[in-house]
Amino acid sequence: MHPAPSVILFSTLSGLGFGFLAFLGWGALAPSGWAAFLLWGLGYGLAVAGLLAATFHLGNPKNALKAFTQWRTSWLSREAWASVATLLTLAPVALSAIFGLGLPRVVGLVGGALAILTVFTTAMIYTQIKAVPRWHHWLTPVMFVAFSVAGGAMLAGVIWAPALLLAVGAVLLAVWRVGDGAFAKAGQTMGTATGLDQLGVPSVLDPAHTAGNYLKREMIFVVGRKHAAKLRKIALVLASALPAVILLLPLGLWGIVLAAVVHLAGALAARWLFFAEAEHVVGLYYGARG
Amino acid sequence: MTALPGTTEKKLGLVIDLDTCVGCQACVTACKGWNDAGIGLSDQNPYGADPSGTFLNRVHSYQVAVPDAPAQVVTFPRSCLHCDNAPCVTVCPTGASYKRAEDGIVLVNEDACIGCGLCAWACPYGAREMDADQGVMKKCTLCVDRIYNETLPEEDREPACVRTCPTNARHFGDFADPESAVSKLVADRGGYDLMPDMGTKPTNKYLPPRKKGPGTASPLAPLLDVKATGIAGWLDRMLGKT
Amino acid sequence: MNQPRVETQREVGDEVRQTTCYMCACRCGINVHLKSGKVSYIEGNRDHPINKGVLCAKGASGIMQVTAPSRLKAPLRRVGPRGSGAFEEISWEEALSTAVAWMKPLRETAPEKLAFFTGRDQSQSLTGWWAQNFGTPNYAAHGGFCSVNMAAGGIYTIGGAFWEFGQPDWDRTKLFVMFGVAEDHDSNPIKIGLGKLKARGARVISVNPVRTGYSAVADDWIGITPGTDGLLILSLIHCLLEAGKIDLDYLAQWTNAPLLLNEADGAEKGLFVRNAESQPFVIDKTTGHPAPWDGKGVQPDLGAEWQGNRTVFRHMVEEYLKPDYAPEAVEARCGVTAIRIRQLAAELAQVAFDQAITLDRPWTDFRGNEHTDMPGRPVSFHAMRGISAHSNGFQTARALHLLQILLGSLETPGGYRLKPPYPKPVEAHPTPHFVTTPGKPLTGPHLGYVRSPDDLCLLPDGSPARIDKAFSWENPFSAHGMMHMVIPNAHAGDPYRIDTLFLYMANMSWNSSMNSARVMEMLTEEKDGEYVIPRIIYSDAYASEMVAYADLILPDTTYLERHDCISLLDRPISEPDAAGDAIRWPVLEPDRDVRCFQSVLLELGVRLGLPGMVNEDGTAKFKDYADYIANHQRRPGVGPLMGFRGNGEAEGRGAPNPDQLARYIQNGAFYQAHVPEEAAFYKPWNKAYQDWAVKLGLYETPQPYLFNIWSEPMRRFQLAAEGFGPRQPPDHLRARLKLAMHPLPIWYAPYGDEDAAFGYPVHALTQRPMDMYHSWGSQNAWLRQIKGHNYLYLPTKIWEAQGFAEGDWARVSSRAGTIVVPVAHMAALNENTVWTWNAIGKRRGAWALDADAPEATTGFLLNHLISELLPDRDGVRLSNSDPVTGQAAWFDQRVRVERVAAGDHPRGTVEPLFERLSDPPLAGGSRAQNSSKNFAKSFRKLLVPGGEAER
């Protein structure tokens, strides 16, 4: 799949934002006044920046509001509802923190849960796509939620954040391990895609079109094996191990900032790979000669 | 809207005969022409170094390694299969993508499309292409603006690709009717689904290439031993002079 | 659920205009839908006899043809050096007077100094007539390059041919065999026919080195070695003869098999024995005595020997029963096993003789014999360039016709059927005319069918009279001329120099020439301060590669903006059951300062005062081409169009009707005259058909004839080569004529095979893709997205031997040149053959495409490898063509293929890469739609090292 910057930024930033909002809602930090404004602002900022980035991915954003209509069947619609519900539910909590209004804690608990649910709905947008076998696995939501929770915990300075970050690493390893075999396991080949497996083993003779098209740009992306291996290492170190170590160092707030920057870079690399390495079955029609 | 209708009254779709398709691309441009005039299918850099455009139908060509026989070449048209269990419909957040209850055609309501591209991701067959100018998703409409179009003569109320196909390799009809020509073709010629394991239950069916190879006539027996009898012997036998 | 309302009643346009397509030579009927005067959609005309509603990829993309930015927009005069593409716009008056100023003195002094050659011209009956009236012998169209072997091989043998002269009886044939048919004439009718066969489950076999398209859907594929089809066919004939599986009755009645051949040594040897009335005759089986060949009730004896003279049949049997033709003797050469050859022969015999059919239709033959029914042998064949573009293509075409004759399937139900005006024997065609008289027309048409050396176009000194050397000893039967030799010969001044080269729709500096790179040099070479070819006038609708090489450009209209007639005088749109002709008419008005070339030609004719084009007072006889189409009479009562003549009811013959074009338009732009049922088969011998053809005006008297197994015209040339007769060939051509002019179909190795010994072992072929076949404008914005560049396809043997991998490039060289191109593997391919799609490659800057267009950077032509001349033989270089017809032998090509390492040649740029042509003034007006959504694209490029999976 084409690793579109908008979608990578969206899912990474909003995941981190919602994770942080969740911890804020759950009261892992109890800031007040300006501190509350800044921290809640950061959470909202990340989440909303992500959502805005996502609109760059839309061909026709003027109809965006219609995306709320299909929550019965569409994970994207559910994500829209969940994100709005989260942001609306947590708004009074944030205001309460900033202005010291003393809102009951339960609202924050619910809002936090909604934030994680939002991340889950985001993940399900990908997970549901059977045509991309690498995504079509329960590990996909686990990974999204793991990133969100670990990132949120990290920003919230939660004591077990390093463990959560290491867990992200473990999940990544599992995702790659399972993902690398997913396409083959799904059993689709050029033969099944065309039905010519009844006849023999097909390969491409002439390309269907020598010019580019949406499918080739959007769904058929080839990332070099070496390049991917390198990026995986970078993602693992930056998203998981290094920030965990940094958090364990006695650097205080700066430690969190540094860890967050490093983690975000790692998360972006991991998310880039999530897209770039995902093979869509439509590629079978195009084959290597494309 | 994006819920799939349980069943549809009719199941309109295409049969594509791979034994007959010669890969001439006529269906590709007839489709492009008809739908460009209708819903608009844009081209980017049409005369440039890197042209690109929206097409709703593409014809691939494959070579197939066949056991114990020379390799074969099969040309393969690919467009929307109007699946019963269309994943492109259910993923749509706005309801723009839908399957019609009356005839099973899968359509995009461009007025509601946000161009998120999720439906194209969901489709295993590459049936949907986002139009780069309009920012909305385009797909085969089964020429819904032809098949019911009373401004057209009745015989023309079929998809543009079917009407133009020079070898008659494309057939349009109702698969819900077991007596329809398309249903019979599928039954007689072993029509099949693409990637059946994807669970999409496509309406369109493909007819496989017929078995190829040398004929079954037994070799001709010589009239007589020409070497021994000479041409004269042959002439005598042939022209019945003996 | 409430579903959105869908617009299902969309109006396609506000008006439909029916005209004729011109994206290739099929000439399908089209419905052009217009909305507010602009084309909105083009579809096939269901009532049209050729396409019956269907339309190919090109036809359906016609809308892009009339909006193409490459359309020329005004007359142009060259201002820079030739080939630079520097032009200035001039007025039509200036353009026409310039052309006249160049041509008029030539007509008055030496008409042959004007050479007028047209390419994919569909108005040859006008252009030829114009050239005839100008008085130059130097006229032809593109057929000599294209497929004259097919036409001439057929006419000389059966009085008809493959190509578009006939078609299989699609509704009845049970076995259809194609030889060397890719996307070929005619494209949609063959597809429709194949569709019919497939719907019935009838069997289709393809003999072709490449298994694509029609060969891909064929039930069996024989991947023959190029140039050996004739040998395979003669081996099939050997098998059929050996088994006695031939149609003796058919041979005795309808062919020259029972005619007697003179066996006395001397000037008559091998000619037919003739009676006192100079008529050949047969021996009647019932009496044992000579009887007229066309006598009623005569039963010709195929095996007769009379006064020491034996029948054609006996000579034929003797020839083909030779062990040289046994499958075992030819299998290695053909690349087809003996078993498969025997298998194919058996299949042919089985269908022809065991599955024969009969139509219950009584008919009477030309001898007056009555027949109660029409027996048919449901085996049919089609063949095109794969066999004809070889130096043995004429004889191969003849061999295939002989095979059909022996099976008795030609012109019978289920077999191959001719389309009016065919059948038409050699005798009914003109001979070539060439004698020039300053200021006067030629005495007859340029192109024709030579019967003997007397008909050759030779000057008194024996040198060729025509610039292309057509109808000379080098290529005696060049019935379509030899367009591919015009520029090389004019450049070499051999046989003489010309002054003005006038070309129409002929991309000679690119894909319509052999050795394109050399042709470009010939066109630009100077001598004594003047170009060697001093003046070039060119007419085209688009900025093709040729435009840059002309001095004066007469911009033509596109096909929707013009009149045309698809005439029975030329290449009509007949079907076996109906004669047909058609028109084009301007369904759009040109939006540029361009004119229909044919109208321009008539205007030039008026200014030059050419007979037939001017009234006695010197005024124009015809206002324009449309006026000519309706009012010109070639013979009294016979004009370009057969329909709606006289009062509007007359068919074929009748006075000109001023309403004729309007009636055609009303009728969907075509007309059909239906062949009566009892005349539909056995046409060359069917009295009802002959009478119908005379009534329609196809000929003036019935023209029944016998199929020519033995070709007397060919034997006359052999006799000359043997030293008989007053007109003698030059000595260096004697051996070649003796072989090539064998009066029975034979096979000899194509001349290109000699290159194998020089290290060029591999056959190199091209095919036109169906989506661009013959199309005058493959810059089409839709079609170029489908095929914007090409690969050279390599067979498994070569692929593996040199360790090629996906994405590789190769250096391909021949005796004439070298190209470096991208390659791809193809398994379904003759193991000693490479091939590519033809004419995808474009020159940089041509056709209003970006200089970096893939057509120019990775698209390529094989033409650069093909020499227009054969290697030097004792100081003589002959055309790389069939020795009989002069058909360009591009499929003889042999090459060497070598893998090129990435380090040795940068990927992405083919060699040779020619200098970019600058744009002449163009219509522009591109529908260019540039995306406003490029933000993501540029951003992506920053982030994405992997790149898109595109090639």
Image: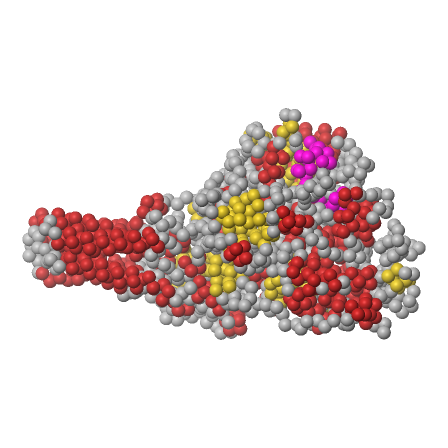
**Count of marks, rendered view:** 0
Compare residues A253 and C101 and report the one nearer the observer.
A253
Q: Is residue C662 left or right of residue A193?
A: right
Which quarter of the rendering shows the N terminus of chain A? bottom left
| x 19%, y 49%: residue | A261
Q: Is residue A10 visible?
A: no
Closest to the observer: B96 or A217?
A: A217
The answer to whether C210 appears left or right of A168 in the picture is right
Residue lying furthest right in this view? C276
User: Which segment is the magenta one?
Assistant: C471-499
User: Which residue sits at x=15%, y=57%?
Assistant: A162
Q: Based on the displayed image, in which of its 4 quarters is residue C728 positioned?
A: top right
Q: Position of residue C712 (x, y in %)?
A: 82, 53
C764 relative to A111, above or below: above
Q: Quadrant of the C terminus of chain A?
A: bottom left
- Please state the horizontal and vertical placement of residue C658, each as a whole percent of the image: 70, 45
Q: Main secondary structure of the magenta part?
A: loop
Front residue (pair C401, C13) = C401
Colour scheme of this structure image? secondary structure
Residue B182 screen position, x and y as percent? 51, 69
Is residue C395 left or right of A165 when viewed as pictured? right
Q: Residue at x 50, y 71 (%)?
A: B190
Q: Does the magenta run of residues contain C475?
A: yes
Seen in the picture, residue C141 relative to A82 is either above or below; the reply is above
Q: Is residue C834 visible?
A: yes
In the rendered image, residue C210 lying in the magenta stretch gets the answer: no
Q: Which residue is most to the top?
A: C529
Q: Residue at x 63, y 29 (%)?
A: C526
Q: What percent of the width, then of the height, locates residue A27? A: 10, 58
